[in-house]
Image (tube, rainbow, N blue to C red):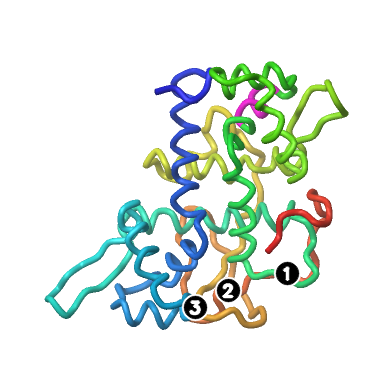
């Protein structure tokens, strides 16, 4: 069933990306996936690595990740059960540094250097706003669009004025710009910079190699940029530590059991989102 008035292929692409974001955005999901990097773990071993979760929180999160096809539960014996990544879960991990790179360039400057895990969580919050993906797709494709025209494309079966709440939120988030009431809407620099993130998510959601992101019909044909810097994982969030040498997107990040996403910089680029934007 179509969710927008866009061509079927584009509509399906947006739906896949929206579904992919819904898998990983719920709180703690990315942290659990990172804690599972490496050999499969027993429940007690995993619980020790995500010790900030209260009793009873881990099990439903694990079940949801298993249902999403990102984690698999292996019952060796009645008393020996382990959890580990599926192939889809492993393929998702290299998407995360792409999100970190975008966040460091475009999210507001925080009062303190943020670990990369928090950069990811903040970015996912923006991308999972209601109708956000479809609005971003249309604005990237058509450059400038009026609110009424955007409504006819993004939510064809709804009253056209319903487009304004999600649009205002995207403007507040710094992803969309407008020159004022009744003026067309367009992507901001931060919104346009999402090309690598959304193109890579689209490739992953479609089961394609991540390097296919450069051929995405909307978000592809990007100018070459430096590869995202890697980051590391563990059960705690201490002060930033030294980073290993940079890797390319085609290779998976190196996972180490220390400094959960300790990838934070002391000097951050100029913010695209005004102070007071979405930060935990």
Which span is picked out in magenta? Answer: 137-142
Name the foreground residue: 94 vs 75. Answer: 75
Report how far apart the C-alphas of labels 1 and 2 lie in the structure: 14 Å
Give the residue drawn at x 57%, y 71%.
261
Name the foreground residue: 164 vs 195. Answer: 164
Which residue in the protein does label 3 denote? 234
Q: Quarter of the image for the C terminus: give it.
A: bottom right
- Helix, strand or loop at label 2? It is loop
- Which of the 4 image quarters holds residue 149? top right
Which mark's residue is nearer the viewer, 1 or 3? 3
Vertical arrangement, residue 56 with respect to residue 88, above or below: below
Q: Quarter of the image for the N terminus: give it.
A: top left
- Which of the 4 image quarters holds residue 132? top right
Give the residue drawn at x 45%, y 45%.
20
Q: Which mark is residue 239?
A: none
Residue 206 lies left or right of residue 66; in this view the side is right
Name the foreground residue: 6 vs 64. Answer: 64
Q: Residue 205: percent from the left, percent from the top? A: 42, 42
Which mark's residue is nearer the viewer, 2 or 3? 3
Q: Which mark is residue 265?
A: 1
Report how far apart the C-alphas of labels 1 and 3 lie in the structure: 19 Å
Vertical arrangement, residue 47 with respect to residue 27, above or below: below
Q: How many marks?
A: 3
Vertical arrangement, residue 252 with respect to residue 15, above or below: below
Please tell me how crowded label 3 is: few (under 14), some (14-19), or many (20+) other residues with Cα within 10 Å. Answer: many
Residue 58 lies left or right of residue 179; in this view the side is left
Q: Residue 51: percent from the left, percent from the top? A: 47, 81
């Amino acid at each position: 069933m179509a969710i927008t008035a866009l061509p079927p292929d584009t509509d399906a692409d947006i739906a896949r990306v929206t579904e992919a974001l819904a898998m990983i955005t719920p709180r703690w999901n990315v942290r659990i996936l990172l804690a599972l990097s490496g050999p499969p773990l027993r429940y007690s071993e995993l619980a020790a690595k995500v010790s900030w979760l209260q009793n009873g929180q881990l099990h439903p999160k694990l079940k949801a990740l298993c249902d999403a096809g990102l984690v698999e539960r292996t019952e060796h014996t009645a008393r020996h059960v382990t959890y580990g990544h599926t192939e889809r879960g492993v393929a998702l991990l290299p998407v995360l540094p792409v999100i970190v790179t975008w966040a460091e360039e475009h999210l507001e400057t925080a009062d303190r250097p943020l670990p990369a895990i928090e950069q990811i969580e903040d970015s996912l919050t923006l991308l999972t706003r209601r109708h956000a993906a479809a609005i971003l797709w249309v604005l990237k494709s058509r450059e400038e669009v009026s609110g009424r025209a955007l409504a006819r494309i993004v939510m064809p079966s709804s009253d056209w004025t319903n487009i304004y709440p999600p649009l205002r939120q995207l403007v507040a988030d710094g992803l969309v710009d407008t020159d004022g009431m009744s003026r067309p809407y367009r992507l901001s620099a931060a919104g346009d910079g999402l090309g690598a993130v959304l193109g890579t998510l689209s490739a992953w959601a479609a089961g394609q190699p991540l390097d296919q992101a450069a051929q995405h019909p909307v978000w592809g044909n990007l100018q070459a940029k430096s590869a995202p810097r890697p980051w590391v994982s563990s059960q705690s969030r201490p002060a930033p530590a030294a980073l290993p040498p940079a890797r390319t997107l085609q290779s998976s990040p190196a996972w180490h059991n220390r400094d959960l996403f300790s990838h934070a910089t002391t000097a951050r680029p100029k913010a695209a989102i005004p102070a007071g934007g979405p930060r935990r």
